[in-house]
Amino acid sequence: MKKKFLASLMAMVMVFGLAACGSSTDATTTEGEDTATTEEGTTSGTGGKIGVSMPTQSLQRWNQDGANMKAELEAAGYEVDLQYAGDNDIPTQVSQIENMIAGGCEVLVVAAIDGSSLTTALQGAAEKNIPVIAYDRLIMDSDAVSYYATFDNYKVGQMQGEYIRDALDLDNAEGPFNIELVTGAPDDNNVNYFFGGAMDVLQPYIDSGKLVVPSGQTEKAQCATANWSTEESQKRFENIISSVGYGPNGVKLDAVLCSNDSTSYGVQNALQAAGYTADNMPIITGQDCDKPNVKNIVAGLQSMSVFKDTRTLAEKVVVMVDAIMKGTEPEINDTETYDNGTGVIPSYLCDPVIVTKDNYKEILIDSGYYTEADVA
Ligand code: GAL
């Protein structure tokens, strides 16, 4: 059903894309933008306006994602309407998307705050045959979604679980070891994969008793953190520390599974306030390689982060947009994993990479992602 929809969508895109192209240069008047790039004869792109909807400016990664995409789409000859939805404000994201649809955007790239809250807004896109690319997070319950571009989210969780397994040498050491679990926003579909991937590795050890979760909080809902907020994860972890009695001189805490860096940072704050230092910090995971977290990795306060090079994802999406605008099929490498409730969404999954104190220079500095000063 999805395939049929996509086939007719591609046909419509070709026709609509060409038609819309003709009018988009006069219909689009984003302030301060150089609309000359949308005139014929410029770079590879066909011209036209692309809407990019990002969830928040309060986390480093989304600022990078947005900025990278805008720069690359513009370099390819497109005009870009880039919007951030305040600080994860769902109604703001809905109205920004509605404005993009009304304002002549020909493709939408959307990183949803709440994967299930865009169904109605995106009906407008479907009616106008505007293809939608779900960016990083899958948009649920909408058949307006044509493609999904992300990192291999299951693998991210798996890497975190395997890191803990190997660092504690769970297959050989006697144990038992104490662990606590922290994941992200319950309305972010990625959490199912991050938490699911990690728990697929760790659950057998919990079942056998080699890993113990003294707080008793093992369900996804109990481990969730609204909006991936550092403050929320810090608060929850302060409660766990005092209720279990963790501390450098109290109950031993061996590891904390954290699904990403913003939540991991809150956990590290709580642990430091309870007297932990680089000398006795438990194993702590993360994701994103946010600057404050890389600093903590270097300082020995966080064990690892999963690096998702936002340059790569942005680049992939720009190529996808360009293919759609030219009426060709974008490259995809997964047609099985991501069902959004209306069918499987053809996806492109980029590869995540583990970063530790031992390889951060090579992965983050030598690649030009950060300077030494950024993470000193
Ligand atoms: C996830 C995303 C992560 C992280 C988190 C918090 O959806 O995949 O990279 O940034 O949101 O924003």
Image (cartoon, rainbow, N blue to C red):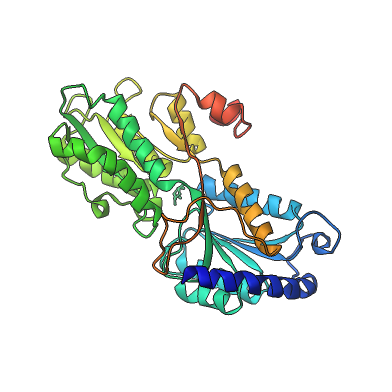
Comparing 322 with 372, the one in front is 322
Quadrant for residue 268, please give it.
top left
In the rendered structure, the answer to whether residue 52 lies left or right of residue 287 reads right
Quadrant for residue 131, please give it.
bottom right
- Name the residue rendered at 50%, 55% in the picture: 347
User: Is any atom of residue 8 visible in this view?
Assistant: yes
Image: 186 above or below 267: below
Provide residue 137's location: percent of width, then percent of height: 46, 56
Provide residue 51's location: percent of width, then percent of height: 63, 64
Image: 282 above or below 81: above
- Name the residue rendered at 61%, 74% in the picture: 101
Comparing 120 with 328, the one in front is 328
Provide residue 239's location: percent of width, then percent of height: 22, 44
Comparing 165 with 280, the one in front is 165
In the rendered structure, the answer to whether residue 138 lies left or right of residue 96 reads left
Q: Looking at this rendering, what residue extends furthest in the bottom direction? A: 127
Number of marks in the rendered image: 0
Quadrant of image for the C terminus: top right
Q: Looking at this rendering, what residue extends furthest in the right direction? A: 41
- Name the residue rendered at 70%, 74% in the picture: 15
Image: 302 above or below 105: above
In the rendered structure, the answer to whether residue 35 lies left or right of residue 275 reads right
Provide residue 319's location: percent of width, then percent of height: 65, 52
Image: 120 above or below 232: below
- Name the residue rendered at 61%, 30% in the picture: 367
User: Is any atom of residue 376 visible in this view?
Assistant: no
